[in-house]
Image: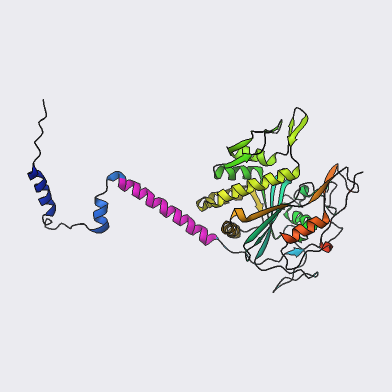
Amino acid sequence: MAIIKRPYSGRRVAKRQAKKNAPARAGAVRRKGFAAWWGRRRLSARISLIIAALLLIFIGGTALAIRLWISRPPEVPIVPNRPSPSGEILPSGASPAQPSGGAEVSPQGYVKRDGVYTFILAGANQGLTDTLMVATLDTKQGTCHVLSIPRDTAVESAPRTIKKINSAYSQQKNVDEPGIAQMKKEIATLIGFQPQYAAVVDYNGFKRLITAIDGIDFNVPMNMRVDGEGINLQKGQQHLNADQALQLVRFRVNYIDGKYGAGYDDYGRMAMQQEVLKVAAKKALANWTKFPEYIKIAQDNLKSDIDWGNLLWFAEQIKNIGMDNVVFHSLPTYTVHNANEISGTYYEAVRAEEALALINETINPFSTPIGAEIVEYIALTEK
């Protein structure tokens, strides 16, 4: 049956307009303002707006919770190194006697600057810290300097046969006391002071963080392949997932079919690790709503003596400074094969004069230059 439409009539329009302008029925209330605006929205639009409002409430609530959790750390003294041949392992959290009250003044006269905080940042695998950095954050000046220490750097007073800095963390008194205290003590022999805090993350924690930030965009400088270690990356700008990012920071030299190929030394690897850290940290700090996830990763994979509220405060300071203004450096060393005086096939020995100059320009937390009397460098020669 055919459908017959009524012809257009101006009376229909007039009738509709009259109905709109008619007085409200008895007992009815004409909606105004937001209620009227909301009533004119379609159902789908209302649902979308409700979801958006809930997301804003969640984000705002998360931000508020983070803000309430953040707490500025106290001004913890920084202990200058006190050279000792004993190499005694300190219990976890212990340090030489510290003055109480007022500014920290050591027997050598070193005074910590106000608003300065120092850290060890380490990446560990099976107890060895193959990534080792010392950071000094100056909240008064708004600066942050990070010094990478080669993993094979010699520590003369280390209480073990293989006296490389990367095995300091593996020294522990029992399973409940990881070697953070000993790591601080040995690093102090190289830089002149014990950093106040330390954070050690394992490979799994690194991969979980990269996954949480949805990977990183990075320009891989060369083809990287190491048979037997699962390293196989192609040169060029690309998006790296967690496994690929770990390959990147582990790579040092192509080793294929039993032969060494193109690559770079430990300084090249440290530079790569610094760049990856900067890219990953910049992306992580750009999204505060994911901090609960970051904290969960840290709880599962981070060994540290930093309070969680303080950790967030430090993260906020770095965010305010901006990762582009965090400056990286590397401790100057030279390689010695079959080194004399200490056991092992090869070591990195510190270039004393260059190292002290760099430390004083960058990570020195004191108001006076660090002198040779509070560092312990050993001069090594080939056997």
For this orientation, the residue located farthest to the top is 1
Q: In which image quadrant can residue 130 be found?
A: top right
Q: Quadrant of the C terminus?
A: top right
Q: How many marks?
A: 0
Q: Quadrant of the N terminus?
A: top left
Q: Which one is in front, 58 or 316?
A: 316
Q: Is residue 156 in the magenta section?
A: no
In this rendering, position of residue 276 left or right of residue 258: left
The x and y percentages for residue 39 are: 24, 51
Q: In which image quadrant can residue 85 be found?
A: bottom right
Give the residues in magenta. Answer: 45-69
Q: Which one is in front, 105 or 173?
A: 105
Which residue is depicted at the point 49% across and 58% down? Answer: 65
In this rendering, position of residue 327 left or right of residue 164: left
Q: Which one is in front, 314 or 140?
A: 140
The x and y percentages for residue 201 are: 66, 48
For this orientation, the residue located farthest to the right is 383
